[in-house]
Amino acid sequence: MPAIPGWLLRHRVSIEPYEGDGAYGPVYGTPGTVRAFVDAKVREVRSPTGEQVVSSSTAYCPPGTAAPPGSRVTLPDGRQTHVIAVYERDGGGLPTPDHTEIQLV
């Protein structure tokens, strides 16, 4: 199956990609709006550094969505959160929807 079907992407999120730290804190790039399915479920996940952290939500987006760890995300309800980890989910030709999974603080 190709990319996750558009009819499943019922929400819109704004992603400001993390670009590093500046003199006054984190620096973010130009925000972009992406269609997504947001699952507001609390769960324990591992950060890219291997530590266990609590994720408050997960956004399922089209394949290739750019959201490096540390990026700022505005959810449909207006709440701002940050990216813990990003996973490209590719079924390798199996009948599963390919997508980008973004775990949020």
Image (cartoon, grey):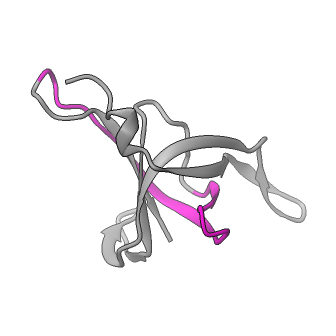
The number of callouts visible is 0
Q: Is residue 35 above or below residue 59?
A: above
Locate residue 13 relative to residue 1 in the image: left or right.
right
Residue extending furthest front?
7
Q: Is residue 26 above or below residue 95?
A: below
Name the residue nearer the viewer: 49 or 95.
Answer: 95
Q: Is residue 73 magenta?
A: yes
Residue situated in front as seen by the camera: 9 or 98: 9
> Going by the picture, which residue comes out furthest to the left?
94
Quarter holding residue 66: top right
Q: Which contiguous range is marked in magenta?
A: 70-93
Q: Is 19 or 33 nearer to us in this picture?
A: 33
Magenta stretch containing residue 62, yes or no?
no
What percent of the width, then of the height, locates residue 78? 67, 68
What residue is shown at x 33% (from left), y 33% (from top)?
A: 5
Q: Quadrant of residue 38?
A: bottom left
Up the image or down, 3 lies above or below 81; here it is above
**Residue drawn at point x = 36 percent, y = 78 percent:** 42
Query: Looking at the rendering, which quadrant does residue 91 occupy?
Result: top left
